[in-house]
Image: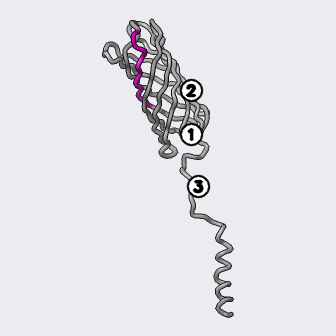
Amino acid sequence: MKKLLTLLLLVLPGASFAGSYSMATTGPSYVDGGYFSEGLSVKPYAMYLMPSDDSDNSMGGGIAADYFFNNYVGLSGLAQWADYKNSTLGNYAVDGVLRLPINSIVSPYVFAGIGLHDGTENALIGRAGVGVDVKITGNMGAFGDWTYTFPESGKKDVVDTYQVLRVGMRFKF
């Protein structure tokens, strides 16, 4: 009986504290309702257009609006313009975006979509690319990406395939 009483005196105080702390983690640090969480963001950017025929590389700019449904999946709509062979080339597109936040600061992403090429002649375009987003503050970051664009074939005054480098800021709401 003395042994049972001693055992209970040793075990019960320890058992009473068992639920007061835990070694379990709550998940990755980026799942915090912060910069890489779901929601709306706006991205103004500068771009560098590189046609496949190496004729006239040019500079331009644009703006995109992103909406992420969760930390990983979102949609992006954009409008961008560049001077090309003494005329303005415009693109309007919608992309599906998959991103993988590595931590609370860096998130690489891939995207693909469709859109409209607006120049001397209109054409449908397909797009695909990769990029990285870097958090600067709680609701502001910088991004850079590369896009390969392939316009509808058979149009005489439409630019051939081209690549675009974009660098800009991201403002999350």
Residue on which the image places disc 3: 26
Hey, which quadrant is residue 164 in on the image?
top left
Residue on which the image places disc 2: 65
Number of dots carrying numbers: 3
Cα–Cα gap, marks 2 and 1? 15 Å
Residue lying furthest front in this view? Answer: 154
- Residue at (44%, 28%) from the top-left corner? 167
Q: Is residue 106 visible?
A: yes
Instruction: Give whichever of 124, 120 is nearer the camera.
Output: 124
Tell me the amino acid under the disc marked 2: Ala
- Measured as percent of width and height from the top left, residue 151 is found at 42, 16
Tell me the amino acid under the disc marked 3: Thr
User: Which range of residues does the magenta coloring cover?
Assistant: 144-154
Hey, which quadrant is residue 36 in on the image?
top right
Residue on which the image places disc 1: 35
- Measured as percent of width and height from the top left, residue 132 is found at 45, 35
Query: Magenta span has 147?
Result: yes
Tell me the amino acid under the disc marked 1: Tyr
Q: Nearer the viewer, mark 3 or mark 1?
A: 3
Which is more N-terminal, label 2 or label 3? 3
- Residue at (60%, 32%) from the top-left corner? 40
Cα–Cα gap, marks 3 and 1? 18 Å
